Image (cartoon, grey):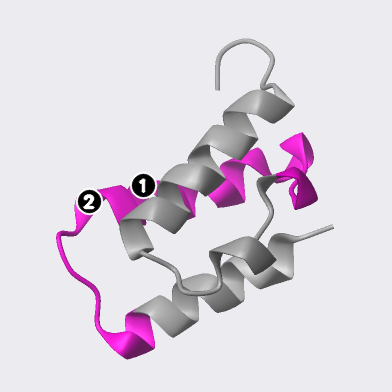
Amino acid sequence: MSGEVTQAEIEAMIEAIKERLKMATAQAMQASAFSVEQYEDIKDIHDVVMSKPHFSISEMEALVSELGKLRR
């Protein structure tokens, strides 16, 4: 990772994940609840979400569960 990661970058990734997954519980997943310290984990999830055109229900549940673990 080059340079300093900002909270705005973290929030943009979370918002992109929510939009891509069309999360029904998007309001519950506030981007501001994530910290720049979790950048690598959030980036990994973001990369997976952005790389696939569709997700099964179980894949979505797993991704949302992982995001839930990263919330502060």
Whether residue 2 can be seen here: yes
Q: Which residues are magenta?
A: 32-59
Please provide percent x and percent y for residue 41.
Answer: 59, 51
Q: Is residue 68 above or below residue 17?
A: below
Please provide percent x and percent y for residue 23.
Answer: 44, 68
Left or right of residue 20: residue 66: right
Q: Residue 8 colored magenta?
A: no
Q: Residue furthest top?
A: 3
Q: Main secondary structure of the magenta part?
A: helix
Left or right of residue 45: residue 41: right
Of helix, strand and loop, which one carries label 2?
Answer: helix
Q: CA distance from mark 2 to mark 1?
A: 6 Å
Left or right of residue 20: residue 34: right
The residue carrying mark 2 is: 51
Whether residue 43 can be seen here: no
The residue carrying mark 1 is: 47
Q: Residue at x 47, y 71 (%)?
A: 63
Q: Are dots 2 and 1 in contact, CB under 8 Å?
A: yes
Q: Is residue 47 above or below residue 57?
A: above
Please provide percent x and percent y for residue 27.
Answer: 62, 63
Q: Amino acid at mark 1?
A: Asp
Q: Residue furthest right?
A: 72
Q: Amino acid at mark 2?
A: Ser
